Image (cartoon, rainbow, N blue to C red):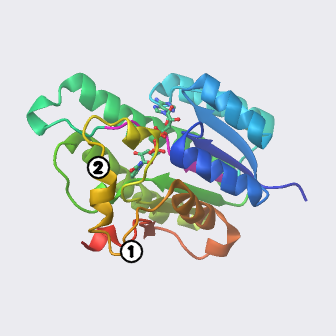
Amino acid sequence: MSSPLALITGAASGIGLAAARRMAGEGWRLLLCDIDAAGLERAAAELGAEAVPLDISDVPAVREAAARLLERHGSVEAVVVCAGISGHGLPFEKVDEAAFDAMLGTHLKGHFFLLQAFAPAMAAAGGGAMVLVSSLFALRGSPNMPHYTAAKGALLGLGRALAVELGPRNIRVNVVAPGLIRTPMTEKSAGYDKDFFTRRETVIPLRRLATPEDVAASIAFLASPAAASLTGQCLSPSGGEAFT
Ligand SMILES: NC(=O)c1ccc[n+]([C@@H]2O[C@H](COP(=O)([O-])OP(=O)(O)OC[C@H]3O[C@@H](n4cnc5c(N)ncnc54)[C@H](O)[C@@H]3O)[C@@H](O)[C@H]2O)c1
């Protein structure tokens, strides 16, 4: 039997790259998708994976890429949606329509239509797993990133809706809601000063930030047969930050 196949968006960096490394180590074949063509090539070469350069916010391009991949591969056993952009440092009054559209287009709309494109083939193949990377901020508020928080909350809602709708076709849909993770996204975020990460650690119950590898472990678990009875769940790798 051939290894299962997974598509991961946002796979060129941070959490998506860590998930790709983890899943490759667990025997998955991978289709890696990202807007960063150079980073994607590096990741694909490292992991012996197929690179799928794509702007996830471009819905016609998403549909075209999905059709091409489905024609070539028939179906995939898992789709992990992880591509994202930072919204930190923008107060409510400063979020203009362009910023709102970019945020919702990347995190929600593109992924919505990507999952829609893969669901019929997955169902026809007997089922599969979808893992949606949301955020701790889908579970609780945070200032100066309302459009990001709205997008991540919508992803959590989408995950729960799809779990119920697609469950009878044996497609499991789960959400991962990480706390603050040190990645290229947060390292370069305008909203965080240089001591931000160490200050956060002092209020996290486990007294350390979760890592991209911690998040990857949750993603890989939810995609795996070990999570066969889990759907509609939300795991928050955050060292307990959700409860502070
Ligand atoms: N880092 C954190 O603290 C944190 C916390 C909670 C949730 N998340 C979420 O985890 C996911 C990964 O974030 P990260 O911290 O690893 O950031 P990252 O910047 O390291 O990785 C994000 C990846 O998404 C890609 N991407 C951005 N826009 C894209 C587009 N339009 N089309 C395709 N790819 C695109 C980027 O090129 C990059 O490779 C994001 O969805 C983010 O919102 C991150």
Question: Dot 1 lies on which element?
Answer: loop
Question: Callout 2: 10 Å neighbours few (<14), some, many (20+)?
Answer: few
Mark 2 = which residue?
Answer: 195
The answer to whether residue 76 is magenta is no
Total numbered circles: 2
Which residue is at 38% across, 51% downward? 155
- Quarter of the image where the N terminus is located: bottom right
The image quadrant of residue 11 is top right
Which residue is at 46% across, 60% downward? 176
What residue type is disc 2 on? Asp
Rendering coords of residue 112 (x, y %): 45, 42
Rendering coords of residue 72 (x, y %): 79, 34
| In this rendering, position of residue 156 left or right of residue 145 | right
- Quarter of the image where the C terminus is located: bottom left
- In magenta, the rendered stretch is 77-86
Rendering coords of residue 20 (x, y %): 65, 48
Which residue is at 22% across, 42% downward? 145
Q: Are circles 2 and 1 on residues that touch, CB within 8 Å?
A: no
Mark 2 or mark 1: name the one nearer the start of the chain: 2
Q: Is mark 1 within 8 Å of ligand 1?
A: no
Image height of 152 relative to 233, above or below: above
Using the image, tell me which numbered label, if any, was put on residue 206: 1
